[in-house]
Amino acid sequence: MPETRRSPTAPPRSFVWTRRVVLTLLTVFTGLPIYVMVTSSLKPLREVAGEFRWIPHGLTVRPYVDIWRTIPLGRYFANSLIVAGTATACSVVVALFAAYAVSRYRFRGRRAFTVSVLATQMFPGILFLLPLFLLFVNIGNTTGVMLYGSRTGLILTYLTFSLPFSIWMLVGYFDSIPRDLDQAAMVDGCGPVGALFRVVIPAAVPGIVAVAIYAFMTAWSEVLFASVMTDDRTRTVSVGLQSYATLNDVYWNQVMAASLVVSVPVVAGFLLLQRYLVAGLTAGAVK
Amino acid sequence: MRIPHLSAPLRATGAATAAVLALGLLAACGGGDDDAGGGGKTITYWASNQGADLSVDRKVLAPEIAKFEQQTGIKVKWEVVPWTDLLKRILGAATSGQGPDVLNIGNTWSASLQATGALQEWDDATFAKIGGRERFLPSALGSTGAQGKPPAAVPLYSLAYGLYYNKKRFADAGIKKPPATWSELVEVSRKLTTGGKYGLAVEGANNAENAHHAFVFTKQHGGDFFDAAGKPTLDSPQAVAGVKQYVDFLASQKIAAPGNAEYVQNETIRDVATGKAAMMVWQAAGRALQERGMKPDEYGVAPVPVQSGAPGSGANVNSIVAGINIAVFKNTRNLDGALKFVQFMTGDAEQKALNTAYGSMPPVKAVSEDPSFGTPEQAVLRKTLAESAAPMPQVPNESQFEELVGTAMKKLFADAAAGRQVTEETVRQRLTEAQQQMPK
Amino acid sequence: MTTTTTPSGVRRDGPGSAPPPRRRRFRLPDRIRRGGLPYLFLLPALLLELLVHIGPMLVGILMSFKELTQFYIRDWGRAPWVGLDNFRLTVDVNAPVGAALLRSFAVTCAFTVLAVGLSWLLGAAAAILTQDSFRGRGWLRALFLTPYALPAYASVIVWAFMFQHDNGLVNHVVHDQLGLTGQRPFWLIGDNSFVALVTVSVWRTWPFAFLILTAGLQNIPRDLYEASAIDGAGVWRQIRAITLPSLAPINQVLVLVLFLWTFNDFNVPYVLFGKSAPEAGDLIAVHIYQSSFVTWNFGTGSAMSVLLLLFLLLVTAVYLPVTAKWRGRDA
């Protein structure tokens, strides 16, 4: 992305010093827990559970071996990737259509739709946990479609968790794409769907990436619904991590090691997409 | 590149329906599970976490369940549900009617879950199918549901509290034998509390532990948390005295470290294993202490102290009847298979194998006398269970009681740790607050 | 925010307005074709929201009028209607239940204001200070974004680990190394738990603010800065006069989102404190969890949730028009 230089002249000293101090402090604040995670994951349990030391004494990679044995981490991880990945893909597609409608059409109920979608973000999740579970079970009993205990139910749930904000962001983004573009496409013979796919979506790729990342993180981190709606085969990693705290003990080193292991691919993907994201969120709300 | 074939609205319709369909398909094939099962040849079982971690449970249970499948031809779909999730999942199951056929529950939950009506009642006829009520120890049966009603569950593993102590710390301080009364314990602890080390460790932020101790101490002061009619009396003078006595170990006696006020992840066991604390009152902790590197001859077990005299009934109770029950879900579509499974799990052979593996006590009479449960630790726990353990209140509101009283004590410990006074008045205030939040 | 932006576009009736240059094989009735199209686009989103959010939410609201204790959870239909009793119980601030709810509400408000404010402040500072290129900027951005990518449980448990009284890093630094306190303070129980809560929440949230604001800065036209530089404006004045006002529209969305997330936050307090939080850290989401799941009284819990919903709706209803007015003035 192009650099936005504030001014052609070098910034004044006061600014440079403020920058150094503030960014250093932020680095310490952000980095400290990450440092603790890394070092703790390399200590034997007895040392982790003991007094804190900056420099670990007995380094070991045992925790990184044990994590796979203590819980079926591989399976949980795969579940998480499937659930979060599918939920993200569906959420983005559904949000694209909805945002397109809200952005490009005036229709009755438009305001009601956006407001009620926003309102869903205000009801504490714990309260519709049981009704939702009940609903899924009833759907299962009447139609034979098993939503509880399956990844599908979780996918459906997560995809609606991220929908409101996704629609919201995409509307803002679409609004900033000149209408003349899709108008022109339609004159060329595209329908509204054609215009959406040929003009609007390509212009909105960064925004879509941003929404996708947001949707992914929403599904990736969720704990409460996953703990009730999954069983051992379908459990996700964010719930599974809790199982390192067992009946008699907390395997601190393994918790940290497992957290790092499952986060590395996410952080890596995140950083790869950072370019798009930073360019993408830009237009999300700016109008 | 142009695609003007279908009419635009049709394509729009198509796209929208495609999206809906895609979701539908996803729903249909995504999980690919056939949980409905439940037919004659399958049962589902939720085990609880009894071993050091979930992988231990899997290792212990897998061969036993394979044995059952081989004997009966019934297939068992089983999983070990972590304690963090178990109650939530049971609630979900009770709400929806969609749950396992057989499940483990903490025995203190028995009456609460019984009230939901989600569990199969164990009347005499049902008991007969697993060999009869008489096979089980009466004390264990006391914690399977409200009195006067058919039990909601069957005892599976029994546990009791014991006083665990670090032998080296005792030897270093020249203490010959473990204390038998609380005043002795305080006296001994004074000697042991020195140089950053403490006489006692308590799990101050753990609601369940707090509530168990509150119950026993209140009993020892001649009180009870529920009256004969089942009404809560959380702030009776006896309860205030009992709770205060326990909190005072940290507050006024200072024989427990202030840091104990935030213990909630079994740091207590760690402290005894490392010698930071010399004693703790804990349920069957031998195995856990060994996992932390203690050898069996490095720790001792004694009955939990009483106010005076020897452990017994009434005011000399010194433990709750702790343990795990096994229950059958009322909505099971395979009651017969479920009962067969319970019979298998409570059978003599399995009782011996499982309780040995988990370090718990068998609640089945015939097995509890087995000489293989004869270690010094087990001798103490067995005697406690048989003579001086009382079941937690078997009332539907037991869960609320545990949470409310446990939380009240957590706050009292926090106050004490922060250097605030814990007086009879503050204890009563906290307990009254808890009392007022109990459902009427 | 969609409802307040008024797209400049003309009213559109779908493609029918352009003369169709091609043969149609099938025609929907005109009425549906013209008016129905946006509804079709909305349909999947609408269905999903109805299924997963709105339906269960309505059930939740119904629950608040029932006595839904463990005696009835197996068959909700059988639970007796109690009218407004649950609400009466929860708003009676003279009784312990209402008083506890009110206290929890106050704690949550204070927590939300602080956490959102700090997250925004850190995010904005970092975004503005990394606007210009300098060596190591890419690495810094990567580091700053990492907390957002960790699973919630992982990022809170590491803080819980650091906040331990006896063996935690925080006390190691504060007490052992710097000697700032006479005794080791408690962070996970007692009054300091509020500080711990805000710290963890800010740590988890500020990267998101940073991200959004960094993105927002990309959109500010360069010539604005150049023009003001020619006018002799320094960096600080540019930040005040150009950068901050330009971020106003993004801030409107960002702050509302942060507010809703933070106010309803369950993960941070639950992982940090367990199911019974200390009074100073008793956030409303955990409080409701405790009042419904732990004590098996879903009616009361629902009543609390409905009150919470009303409050948040009210806040949003005030917030949107007010901030829209500011935006109109600033932009």
Image (cartoon, coloured by chain):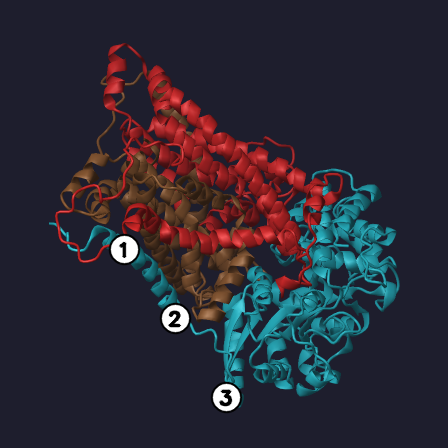
Q: Earlier in the sequence, mark 3 or mark 1?
A: 1
What's the residue type where badge 1 is placed? Ala
Element class at badge 2: loop
Q: Quadrant of the N terminus of chain A?
A: top left
Q: Earlier in the sequence, mark 1 or mark 2?
A: 1
Distance between the alpha carbons at the discs numbered 3 and 2: 24 Å
What's the residue type where badge 2 is placed? Gly
Q: Colour of chain B?
A: cyan
Q: Chain of mark 3?
A: B
Task: Depth check: give the residue in front, A188 or B23.
Answer: A188
Q: As drawn, is B193 to the left or to the right of C232?
A: right
Residue under numbered circle 2 = B32
What's the residue type where badge 3 is placed? Gly
Q: Residue B15, which numbered label?
A: 1
Residues under numbered marks 1 and 2 in contact, where contact means CB atoms less than 8 Å apart: no
Q: Residue C98: give x, y in percent of width and height.
A: 70, 42
Q: Chain of mark 2?
A: B
Element class at badge 3: loop
Q: Residues within 10 Å of mark 2 (few under 14, many from 20)?
A: some
Distance between the alpha carbons at the discs numbered 3 and 1: 49 Å
Element class at badge 1: helix
Q: Are marks 1 and 2 on the same chain?
A: yes
Q: Chain of mark 1?
A: B
Mark toward the viewer: 3 or 1: 1
Q: Are marks 3 and 2 on the same chain?
A: yes
Q: Colour of chain C?
A: red
Residue under numbered circle 3 = B73
